[in-house]
Amino acid sequence: MSNVFVERMEVLPRRLAGAIVRIPIATGVLILLAASGLPASHIEAQGRVTLRTDQRQMLTAEVFTHVSHIRELSDKRVIVADGKERRLLLVDFEAGSGVTVGRQGAGPQEYRSVGRLIPAGRDSAMMFDQATRRWVRITGAPSVDVISANQLGALAGRGALDGDGRGRFLAIVGRATTEQPPLPGAPDSSTLVLISPAAARTDTIAWLEERAVRVQTGAITAEGRPSSLRIQFSPLPARDQALITRDGWIAIARQAPHRIEWISPTRQRTVGPSLAFDNLPLTARERQAVRARFERAGSAKGRPADDAPWPERLPPFLDDALLEAPDGRLVLARTPTAANPGNRYVFIERTGRVGATLELPPTERVVGFGAATVYTVVQDDDGLERLARYRWP
């Protein structure tokens, strides 16, 4: 038996015989949970998820600069992408070690840049190498192999947001800009498409709003072209995002109005209710907090400039904010604030409503989920990161 003390919570879910049973409890009551019931590292209770750090398993042998994506294989080894160091590793928590996968270059088993890890079956992942404009497959062998263009169809030479592991990929066509003054012909939104290379099919899913870039042009020449061009990226990019789940549902996170849209495999659309968020004005204090986060992360972009295209208010979420939980819920990372600088996550049901929340300190963030695991990275005082995992029902 393990002892768990629950404060200010009215309902404690417990997984039993494949179902979740909700057990009413009184505030501040000591609850005894059987070892075969709720895992010791995870508690979910009326809107709050708690990860117990005393049950955290840390991979101390490998140090990272910035873990951008992870992909768990069926044998529980994990492919890790370090975006800043541009390297791939295959790590084994049981052995407490990792091995480098592939090498830098443009050869048949090489890559020059590290991107998003897209599911490609139980024991591999796909990654788009932006520098060489080609896709590679990463396996647990470990190996990196270039995927031929004739296998990719409309995906050839194009990156993707996500994949369902069964050969369907979400991608964006076009990138929106906010121009000042306007740049002739610039798009004001992006098109979300679903690409199925095996079926040679591309379906338009939705429009995505983007407000992350400012393009400034100089005087127009006699040839009708701008004499100069300046592109500025927002320190707080506020654009819609999308994800496809393992069972083929598509989730679209909207900035304004802030809500979640779910699209079923049969194209039935569920538009969720407006979701509450901080919705704070971008004061001088909030700007300073953003700059502090850039410095803590050791961002290669440096401190945001005062004349950058700052939004008037803090957006509800930033880039790379979406993950899929093992039970198919959408996990959305909230924008940190000066008053609440930690990493906050909301778990959203397929009705579009928030089912639970998770809060972590500023030095720990969620980077992905496995079949029964949540993976985080923990940053030390020197800004270096280590991968950790918790059990997750």
Image: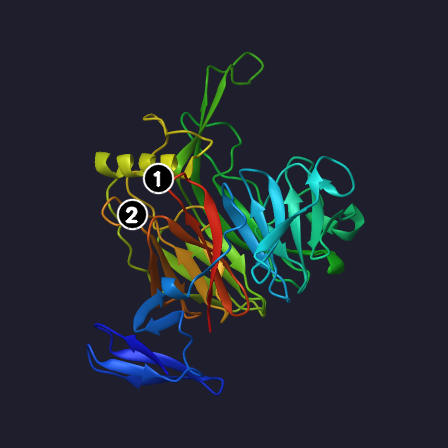
Identity, as a three-letter code, of the amino acid under mark 1? Arg
Q: In this view, does 335 lie to the left or right of 121?
A: left
Q: Distance between the residues labelled 2 and 1?
A: 9 Å
- Is residue 181 found left or right of 99 in the rendered image? left
Mark 2 crowdedness (10 Å alpha carbons): few <14, some 14-19, many ≥20: some
What's the coloring here? Answer: rainbow
Tell me whether circle 2 and circle 1 mark residues in contact (CB < 8 Å). Answer: yes
Mark 1: give few (<14), some (14-19) or many (20+) Cα within 10 Å.
some
Q: Residue 293 shows which numbered tag?
A: 1
Lower sequence index among marks 2 and 1: 1
8 versus 64 height, above or below: below
Return the x and y of residue 173 as percentages of the image width and height: 59, 44
Number of the label disc, if any, that sits on residue 341: 2
Where residue 123 sits, quadrant-wise, is: bottom right
Relative to 295, say whether 63 is above or below: below
Above or below residue 18? Residue 177 is above
Rendering quarter of residue 83: top right
On residue 9, which mark appears?
none
- SS class, disc 1: helix
The front one of 275 and 289 is: 289
For the point 28% across and 35% down, which residue is it?
Answer: 287
Residue 171: percent from the left, percent from the top?
59, 50
Q: Where on the picture, by quarter, is residue 204?
A: bottom right
